[in-house]
Image (cartoon, rainbow, N blue to C red):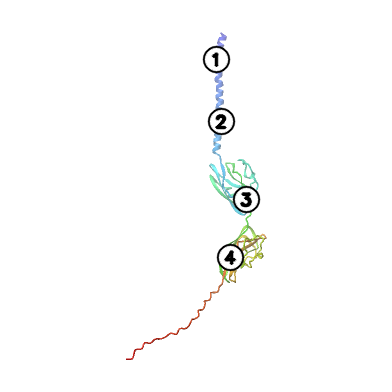
Amino acid sequence: MAEENEKQDSPAGAIGGDLAGNKLIWIAGAIILLIAGWFGLRAIFASMESYRVTLVDAPKEVSANSTATFTWRVDGPATTINHTAVHLGTTSQTGELGKDVKPENTPYNHIVQDFANGNFNIPLQFVGNIGLGNPGTYYYRVHAEVKGKNYWSDEYSLEVKVPEYKVVILNTPTEVVEDATFAFTWRIDGLATTINSTSIYYGTASSPGELAKDVKPEDTKYTGFVKDFAKGNYNIPLQFVGNAVIASPETYYLRGYALINNQNYWTEERVLEVKSAKAPTATPVEAIGAVTPTLSIAVSPTP
């Protein structure tokens, strides 16, 4: 009987054991689902909180002491930020910069200050300017700090070049009268410096073609010049207005000139006509024969 009872009790015990095991499996499965759901929700919220910094427009090169203008965007869920800027430097930092990399941990030691401090509601597009005085290659990234994290664009480069000095005649007459005062206007552009001589040189003989930087005024055929700024100290870039008087009527050839860093800079050659101030004399007309007038008198006939 004992064996029979034991046999009868065995299925019930097995069923109880199976139920307990299934319960544990369900509990473990629920825990796994909860964990998976938590990480899934975190991933969803993380994607919703994703921010992006994008360079929209920037120059490839600028002249030293000129202004470089950058346009960029900060996109993502609406929020307020306190800092976004273009960070530049002469040393490159390649690769992707993580959200824990602050600007002070990079080699970018120049900054576009326009939006470096403030309150800015993003998404938003920004336009900022910076003056770069030293020539060379600059590397830069756009940066924004959003909710304590650092967002960076890719790295770009910008060439800052020494501008070529240039003399340009802005205004000159093409025709004047002898012994009359007239004016020339010209301008010198380039990197800021001090010069000691600039003028307009002219003469009745042409010195055609392009004049190289080693061609001095005495090497040309120009015999006259505007004296106003031929000697002195002048800070360029600067615009000049000088006066001249030419006594002899004739065709004159002229160029603008400046001595900069011991090199000679010339404009293209122009032509000036100097006319005589005397009024033309009328040609005398000679009388061709004299005609004596006659008088006719009517006389009545004698009866």
Amino acid under disc 1: Pro
Q: Nearer the viewer, mark 1 or mark 3?
A: 3
Dot 3 and dot 4 residues touching (CB under 8 Å): no
The extreme left residue here reads 303
Residue 117: percent from the left, percent from the top?
58, 47
Amino acid under disc 3: Glu
Count neighbours of disc 4 (C-alpha within 10 A) and say few if under 14, some if 14 to 19, many if 20 or more.
some
Q: Which of marks 3 and 4 is in front?
A: 4
Q: Which residue was labeled with disc 4?
A: 271
Q: Which residue is drawn at 56% across and 24% down?
A: 25
Badge number at residue 11: 1
Count neighbours of disc 1 (C-alpha within 10 A) and say few if under 14, some if 14 to 19, many if 20 or more.
few
Q: Which residue was labeled with disc 2?
A: 36
Q: Which residue was labeled with disc 3?
A: 159
* Numbered marks: total: 4
Which badge, 2 or 4, comes first in the chain's sequence? Answer: 2
Tell me how far mark 3 sits from mark 4, CA to CA.
39 Å
Residue 188: percent from the left, percent from the top?
61, 60
Count neighbours of disc 2 (C-alpha within 10 A) and say few if under 14, some if 14 to 19, many if 20 or more.
few
Residue 42 location, quadrant: top right
Which badge, 1 or 2, comes first in the chain's sequence? Answer: 1
Dot 1 and dot 3 residues touching (CB under 8 Å): no
